[in-house]
Amino acid sequence: MDDTSTLVGAAAGADPEQGLRAVRALRELADRLETLQVRRARQLGWSWEHIAAALGVSKQAAHKKHRKA
Amino acid sequence: MFERFTQDARSAVVDAQQVARELHSPRIDTRHLLVALVAARPGVHDTAHPGIYDTLRAVGLDPDDVAARARTAIVGDDPLDRAALASLGIDLDAVRAATDAFFGPGSLDAAQNRGPARAHLPFAPDAKKALELSLREAMRLREKSIGARHLLLGILRADSPGGRVLDGACVDAGVDLTALRTALDQAERAA
């Protein structure tokens, strides 16, 4: 992959500014996907225990973060 | 308030919504309104007024440059940075295509608000403020209806992100902001 040096650069933080922006973007993307997936799981009737276990967090944490979604 | 909007002002609001969707923004702020407004030409029923596009040109501003600046500012604020994700090997367009297909069009953008995708994007607080101020600008100029020009004056009055983009464009072009305000006022009075 031709992008390997860029990839390593951003991830390893050759330029902290770029690396940090990448981390922020990744977290944002993960948060949004989590919102969409949790909402769908709830619509399919999944319990908070089940969702929390899949996400690897406590039931309380999952419920607190997503009850309004 | 919207019932007092002229056709031009309504079009600008509709266009701002379109700009926000295009740039994957969760809300319409004054920068989206600015992009929509600077492109405004005289309306069919409004030919006595020069459009904002021509008014900007007359004071020495390039409307296309103003729009480009506003778009750059909007994209720069997007936490879902396409280039940053690409540096990690993630193709945002591919992710978006997948979420559009699976969760519905616009779902990834709407998830930023933790809400479902809506038919209409909400206004950000700065845009609400600018819309309110546009009413005041129209009243100040003793106009019954709120036109596109009043909206732009409202954005300038609001000390908003959109106003700051316009301010920056004025500074770089050596245009006095007061001259722009006056030109917008007088375009109204000439009617």
Image: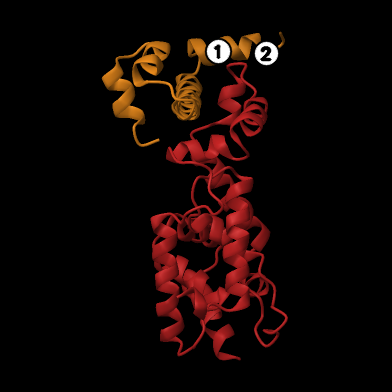
Q: Chain of mark 2?
A: A
Taking the spot 46% from the left edge, 87% from the top edge, the residue there is B141
Q: Nearer the viewer, residue B175 or B8?
A: B8
Q: Nearer the viewer, residue B175 or B70?
A: B70
- Per the image, label 2 sits on a secondary structure element best described as loop
Give the distance between the C-alpha atoms of the residues marked 2 and 1, in whole angstroms: 10 Å
Q: Position of residue A68 (x, y in %)?
A: 35, 37
Q: Is residue B18 left or right of residue A44?
A: right
Q: Is B50 situated above or below B120?
A: below
Q: Colour of chain A?
A: orange
Q: Quadrant of the N terminus of chain B?
A: bottom left
**Which residue in the structure is indicated by mark 2?**
A3
Q: Position of residue B107 (x, y in %)?
A: 56, 37
- Number of marks: 2
**Which residue in the structure is indicated by mark 1?**
A9
Q: Give the residue type that dot 2 points to.
A: Asp
